[in-house]
Amino acid sequence: MDGFEGPLDLLLTLARTQKVDLRAISVLALARQYLAFVEKARELRIELAADYLVMAAWLAFLKSRLLLPPDPEEEGPSAEDLAAHLAFQLERLEAMRKAAARLMARDQLGRDVFARGEPQGVERARRVTYTATLLDLMQGYARLRTRDDFRPFVMDRDGVFTMEEALERMRPLIGAVVEWTDILSFLPQGWNADAARCRSATAATFAATLELAKGGGLDLRQTDTFGPIHIRRRP
Amino acid sequence: MSDDDAQTPESLFQAPPLAEQERMVEAILFASAAPVTVADLHARLPHGCDAPAALSHLAKRYEGRGVRLIRVGDAWAFRTASDLAFLMTRETVETRKLSRAAIETLAIIAYHQPVTRAEIEEIRGVSVSKGTVEQLLELDWIKLGKRKQTPGRPVTFVVTRAFLDHFGLETPRDLPGLKELRAAGLLESTPSPDALPEPEGDAQDDLFVPSPPEEPPV
Amino acid sequence: MSDDDAQTPESLFQAPPLAEQERMVEAILFASAAPVTVADLHARLPHGCDAPAALSHLAKRYEGRGVRLIRVGDAWAFRTASDLAFLMTRETVETRKLSRAAIETLAIIAYHQPVTRAEIEEIRGVSVSKGTVEQLLELDWIKLGKRKQTPGRPVTFVVTRAFLDHFGLETPRDLPGLKELRAAGLLESTPSPDALPEPEGDAQDDLFVPSPPEEPPV
């Protein structure tokens, strides 16, 4: 049974022995051939697969239906319909086999026609493009300007004369101040012209003289309110 | 957009002359062993190229040559002329011999696609072994199609571009004897009158129409 | 092949016409995985073929085509025409967001152009890396403007036409000003409590006045 691809294949092989067109085949005769074949296999103690036996049972049923006059009570397909369908199945299977043979007879790639033997692979070149939107740009700029607004306040040192600077300036000078002298004359050069710089230098110098007075190095006096402040070396 | 504006972009991205496009398509197809789709060609050619026009010129140029330009579904490839196969013994690829079951199953899928496993079994009268389907899938000759809109939504099988390429078919419509088989009613799934009605219904109506997206008609 | 040879009994196995030999050589070279020597061609072609003659005809036929017949040592092969090599690389374009440093630098150039590197660094508060400027130059979004008429005559940067195109601006003046940025909620800070004069006030007014001659208004 190895040579057959199932019961339909066996039936097709048997049908060919009738040497007629499959459309004109006698299904009754075919059923008898098949059943005889199965009987023979049984005698030879050849084990048949289940589907061969199922087909045998179905064909035995079909054979009896074909031989008996049709029962008008019975519903469903007639015996002739069943036989016609079996013939159709056989014809279709044979047609597909012929089609398969024609397909395999075509020129085949790698056997009859050939593809490029040395294909040139497509090189993958990765290119990176950068993108930014107008919003990115605006946000970036806004971020910068926002940062400016929050920059910690830093004194503009250009216009500031510190007390430390004033002290450093006054210390070597006071030894020579014997007479009462207006502290405004001790302002460093160039700090008089601009009002803001003058204020800063005056304040720093005054603070420095207070510091020096505290240390006992000099005396301070102011004769009237808002009047000029004079200093001299403590005798 | 003024007339001036309309002309500027065109001249900036003007497609190369057709003769040049033909050379480009020639180079791309020559470099590839597998068929290249028209969409792929357009993706690789400069902007504005007309791949189908270039292909048709190219096909004419190679008529009668030792190498031919052939169409495979929506793709194109150069292949050696089949009459020169005798020279190619060195290139011949030894393929594993397909079993009779595999060949029949392949033919049934090709002629009846999209087709379910149950339909294949109904035609062959025997169950389809898993190995057979796997072998055909491995060869990349068949693939899964859409599920059938019937109870159980069974998967269907269809043939691939590699199948068409292997057997030198432009489209599944070019299968040998397809028209005759259809005319003879042998591609119809007639339900078995005794058993439960087969669920195939309109299988034949959409034989090659709903080709999956990978296989769009050219 | 000389006339004498043709007269010998070998004429029984007469060589195919040269045009046919050319087809054969074409097919062999096409399908071969490596360049083929003349000796190899003779071994594979029918008896009596003249491979060098066929090769020279074939080479002429492919002159100026998308593929060329070329000699590789003592062997022959088809190769893509060198001017079409660009078709053999498939660029995959990856789009990335511009870095924060680059965006800020670009923004400063756009809002303050023409601007020197030192000025950019002053505004950003950090030094500008060479890479950032190079990247923006490569993107063709900035270019060198006129040198500044200050000590050292430093170069300045200005934005380009490509920049305006990319950001959908007609002129650099179309960039939203700080007031608009604040109105759009992009500038959330309140002015400093010191009530220092806002630096942007007049900065905006003359921002784009000295637009360089390379950037004529559209």
Image: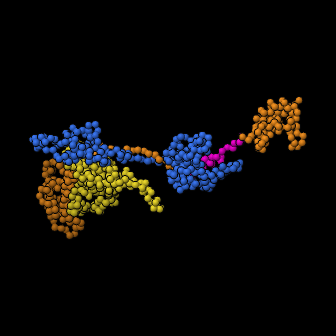
Chain colours: A orange, B yellow, C blue
**For residue C200, above or below residue A188:** below
List the single residue furthest toward the left: C9
Quadrant for the C terminus of chain A, please.
Answer: top right
List the single residue furthest toward the bottom: A72
Q: Is residue A225 visible?
A: yes
Please tell me which residue lies in front, C66 or C180: C66
Please tell me which residue lies in front, C6 or A223: C6
Q: Residue at x 29, y 45 (%)?
A: C68
Residue C161 in percent (x, y) is at 51, 52
Residue C40 in percent (x, y) is at 22, 39
List the single residue furthest toward the right: A223
Please tell me which residue lies in front, A78 or A69: A78
Q: Residue at x 52, y 55 (%)?
A: C168
Q: Which residues are magenta?
A: A138-157
Please tell me which residue lies in front, B135 or C18: C18
Q: Is residue A142 magenta?
A: yes
Q: Main secondary structure of the magenta part?
A: helix
Q: Is residue B33 visible?
A: no
Residue B114 in percent (x, y) is at 29, 57
Q: Is residue B61 magenta?
A: no
Residue C30 in percent (x, y) is at 26, 45
Q: Residue at x 80, y 35 (%)?
A: A208
